Image: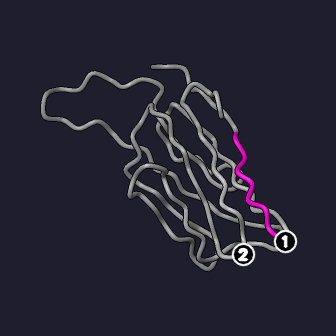
Amino acid sequence: MPKALEAIKGLWLNKASGIILCCALVSAIGLGLLFGAFSLALASAEPVLPPGQEAPSATLSGLVRNADGPVSGATVRVQATDNMAVTDENGAFMLAGLPPAELVTITASAPGHYINWTAVVPDGITT
């Protein structure tokens, strides 16, 4: 079993009255671990699969918050894809079908906030 790799990355969205903060935990164990504001589970290496079997996908779920609390109606998107979610009244979102072991760039935006992004790679390096 590959060694679990972990990295923490923050996503800050500036606002006149505060900041939106999202954190990601990357883990190679393939479980959706909640850490801070949101989590991302990825495999550290793609296993060899029998013919006809699809590779597993990762899921990203969590909360978008600012200094005042949850941000409802924020759009959370996987950059360069159509994969997106809108936060509920508690600021919660879930993105499914993310490719494991690949660079994932997440953007978040909401009315009255600046758009920002974070990129996470499975080996723990963030950009």
**In the image, is residue 25 above or below residue 91?**
above
User: Is residue 73 highlighted in magenta?
Assistant: no
What residue does disc 1 label? Answer: 16
Whether the residues at callouts 1 and 2 have beta carbons within 8 Å, the answer is yes
**What percent of the width, then of the height, locates residue 105?**
54, 44
**In the image, is residue 89 above or below residue 21?**
below
For image coordinates 45% across by 62% down, the residue present is: 84
For image coordinates 51% across by 52% down, the residue present is: 60
Which quadrant: the C terminus?
Answer: top right
Q: Nearer the viewer, residue 124 or 127?
A: 127
In the image, taking residue 23 as reference, residue 53 lies left or right, namely left
**What percent of the width, then of the height, locates residue 13?**
73, 59
For image coordinates 48% across by 19% down, the residue present is: 2
What residue does disc 2 label? Answer: 112
Alpha carbon separation for disc pair 1 and 2: 8 Å
Q: Which residues are magenta?
A: 9-16
Q: Main secondary structure of the magenta part?
A: strand
Of all residues, the one furthest to the bottom in this rendering is: 89
The numbered dot on residue 113 is: none
Q: Amino acid at mark 2?
A: Gly
Q: Could you tell me how many numbered marks the image carries?
A: 2
Q: Nearer the viewer, residue 48 or 113?
A: 113
In the image, taking residue 59 as reference, residue 91 lies left or right, namely right
In the image, taking residue 12 as reference, residue 40 lies left or right, namely left
**What percent of the width, then of the height, locates residue 36?**
72, 52
Which element type, helix, strand or loop, lies under badge 1? loop
Which element type, helix, strand or loop, lies under badge 2? loop
In the image, taking residue 58 as reference, residue 33 lies left or right, namely right
Q: Amino acid at mark 1?
A: Ala
